[in-house]
Structures are given as C-alpha cells and as structure tokens.
Amino acid sequence: MIAKFVRFGLGPLVRWIYRPQIHGVENIPAEGPVLLASNHRAALDTGAITFATPRQVKFLGKAEYFVGKGFKGRLMAGFLGGLGYVPVERGNAQAGLAALEAARKVLDAGGVFAIYPEGTRSLDGRLHRGHTGVAALALATQAKVVPVALHGTEKLQPNGARIPRLAKITVRFGEPMDFSRYEGQDASPAIRRSVTDEIMYRILELSGQEYVDKYHKRPDAQ
C-alpha cells in the first residue's frame, strides 16, 4: 500500500512541485533488463531517477533501514520499497558480492536496476573514475546500459537542510549501450575496465562535468 502510494501518488505530486526537465526518456527500453548508470550528486538522486523513469527502478539500500520496529519502522520500509530500494548488507567483501547478486537478480528477471558507478556521491562536483561493478552486471546479464546525467539535485538539500528546497532539476537519459560483443568475457578484468570507462565517458558527455581519473573518496575515508 505504502509502496504504491509513493510511486503513483507521491511521484506525480513531486513532479508537479519541482517540474524537472526530463530528456531522452524514450531511450529507456520498454521491456527487458536495463541498467541505468548515473552520476551521483546528492542523496536525493534516487528519488529523481525513480520519479523520472516510466518503469519501476530498483536500487541497493542498507538493510538496517528496513528493520525498524513499530509503525515508524514499517512506514520507512514501505517508503523505501516504493522508491525501489532492495535491502542488502553493507560493510565487507561478502556484502559487495551480495550487492552484485541482488542487482543481478533484478536484471535476470527483466527489470530495471540503477547504479552509481562512482560508488559514492561526488562532493567536489566532478565526475570520478567508475568502479567495474557496473560492467560486471552489464556483461553477465546482457542488459542494455542507459547512461544518466543528473543536474541540480545537489541544490535540493544542501548540508544542514532538513527539508528539500526548490531547485531546477534536469535528468538526461542517453542512448542505450549494447555490450553483447563481449559475450562470455565478463570475467576479464581488462574488458570490465574498458566497458566501465566507455560508460563513464557517455555519462561525462551527458553531464558536462569535469572528469577525474581516480576513485572518489569521502574525507572520512582518506
């Protein structure tokens, strides 16, 4: 019930209030597995993608967000489920494998899964080197990869703001990318790196961000 309200009730309301500019939505295949690969500017990026995409989109979410007790816990779990979050444990190597497996299940079932190849939000506004998990998923599932560029989401909820502000948001979907030419080579690190770099370049073209050929690390991780 809550999940349906978020998608079919809250979604139209959010689009009416913020009136995001959405370009290239026709590039999202109407059926079959699709991997949305996006730049990552803000915590609210997930909502921007969810409400801009005609198909149900799945994302990875921390499992602890889904285990709250009482009415508040059920409300939170339902809200996150409506946004498309799939609960998965985080924090170690096994968790990373579990995350990829959860994403693969969505794609193997013909669904749409969204991933941020940078791995974390860009705090400096630049586009950073992508992790190869995006390529591993694309190659293993033969899903079409649709590059996504978000603009303005970083202004929705600046540090210290509890309530999202009005801001001009733009969501651009690029033409789908087909990596079937690499069928059977998904275990090759070199192929994964090449595919990831190709995807990041397409995101770069859409976003117009400055590119940095190194992984982004948050200050507390350095």
Image (tube, helix red, strand yellow):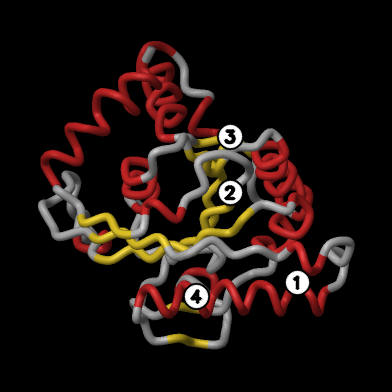
- What residue does disc 4 label? 202
Mark 4 touches mark 3? (CB < 8 Å): no
Question: Which amino acid does the dot numbered 4 rest on?
Answer: Arg
> Which tag, 1 or 3, sits closer to the chain's start?
3
Mark 4 touches mark 1? (CB < 8 Å): no
User: What is the CA distance from the residue labelled 1 to the residue labelled 2?
Assistant: 18 Å
User: What is the CA distance from the residue labelled 2 to the residue labelled 4?
Assistant: 16 Å
Q: Position of residue 124 (x, y in %)?
A: 35, 78
User: What is the CA distance from the residue labelled 1 to the residue labelled 3?
Assistant: 26 Å
- What residue does disc 1 label? 192
Q: Could you say which quadrant of the image residue 200 lies in?
A: bottom right
> Which tag, 4 or 1, sits closer to the chain's start?
1
Classed neighbour count for the residue bearing mark 1: other residues with Cα under 10 Å, few (<14), some (14–19), many (≥20) = many
The foreground one among 172 and 128 is 172
> Which tag, 4 or 3, sits closer to the chain's start?
3
Q: Secondary structure at mark 4?
A: helix
Q: Nearer the viewer, mark 4 or mark 3?
A: 4
Q: Position of residue 39 (x, y in %)?
A: 44, 66
Question: Which amino acid does the dot numbered 1 rest on?
Answer: Arg
Mark 3 touches mark 2? (CB < 8 Å): no
Q: Secondary structure at mark 1?
A: helix
Question: Which amino acid does the dot numbered 3 rest on?
Answer: Pro
Image point 52% across, 74% down: which residue?
217
> Which tag, 2 or 4, sits closer to the chain's start?
2
Q: Nearer the viewer, mark 4 or mark 1?
A: 4
Image point 47% across, 50% down: which residue?
28
> Which tag, 3 or 2, sits closer to the chain's start?
2
> Which tag, 1 or 2, sits closer to the chain's start?
2
Q: Could you say which quadrant of the image residue 22 lies in?
A: bottom left
- What residue does disc 3 label? 87
Question: Which amino acid does the dot numbered 2 rest on?
Answer: Val
User: What is the CA distance from the residue labelled 4 to the residue labelled 3?
Assistant: 29 Å
